[in-house]
Image (spheres, rainbow, N blue to C red):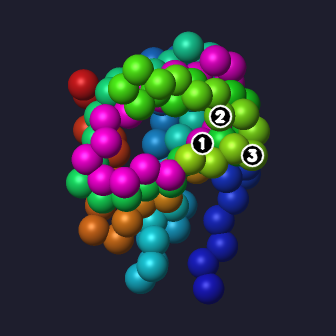
Amino acid sequence: MELASFLNDLAFSDEQVLISPLIDNAFTKEIRIAFKEGQIMKEHKTKFPISVMTVIGSIEFTVGEKVVTLNQGDVVSLEGNVMHELVATEKSVVRLSLHKGDSVARVNSVLKL
């Protein structure tokens, strides 16, 4: 059994979004992403399906020309190879659920775009 919290030991950075891997098991990878208001994860994609859930705050989630607001408790899923962008409209914590074949290193590389 692995136990993790999206709220304990929570930190934010003025410089960039903070990415913290919380669980990595045979089934999934669960990642916490902490945004300050206005911080962005620029448009990117992965070849694997993902799920994104807003735990705290509000995120504008953009796919192509469509922008949806993900408020606390909202979740969206995407198939692989879909370009998307996240913008925090307020201080926010996001849960990113990755496919086992995906990597935390790839998520971190998005911050360098």
Q: Could you tell me if residue 110 is visible in this image?
A: no
* 3D distance between C-alphas at marks 2 and 1: 10 Å
Q: Amino acid at mark 3?
A: Gly
Q: Amino acid at mark 2?
A: Leu
* 3D distance between C-alphas at marks 3 and 2: 8 Å
The residue drawn where x is 67% and y is 52% is: 6
* 3D distance between C-alphas at marks 1 and 3: 10 Å
Q: Are marks 2 and 1 in contact (CB under 8 Å)?
A: yes
> Could you say which disc has been placed on residue 73 in the image?
3
42 relative position to 55: left or right: left
> Could you say which disc has been placed on residue 80 in the image?
none
Q: Secondary structure at mark 2?
A: strand
Q: Are marks 1 and 3 in contact (CB under 8 Å)?
A: no
The residue drawn where x is 69% and y is 59% is: 5
23 relative position to 44: left or right: right
Q: Is residue 84 magenta?
A: yes
Report the residue marked by disc 2: 70
Callout 1: few (<14), some (14-19), or many (20+) C-alpha neighbours within 10 Å? many
State the extent of the magenta-drawn residues as a range: 77-94
Residue with the most extreme top position: 38
Above or below, comparing residue 3 to residue 5 in the picture: below
Where residue 93 appears, x then y in whole percent? Answer: 64, 38
The residue drawn where x is 47% and y is 25% is: 66
Q: Is residue 27 magenta?
A: no
> Could you say which disc has been placed on residue 94 in the image?
1
Where residue 33 appears, x then y in whole percent? Answer: 53, 41
Above or below, comparing residue 26 to residue 19 in the picture: below
Where residue 65 appears, x then y in whole percent? Answer: 41, 20
Callout 3: few (<14), some (14-19), or many (20+) C-alpha neighbours within 10 Å? few
The residue drawn where x is 75% and y is 46% is: 73
Q: Which quadrant of the view contains residue 37?
A: top right
Q: Secondary structure at mark 3?
A: loop
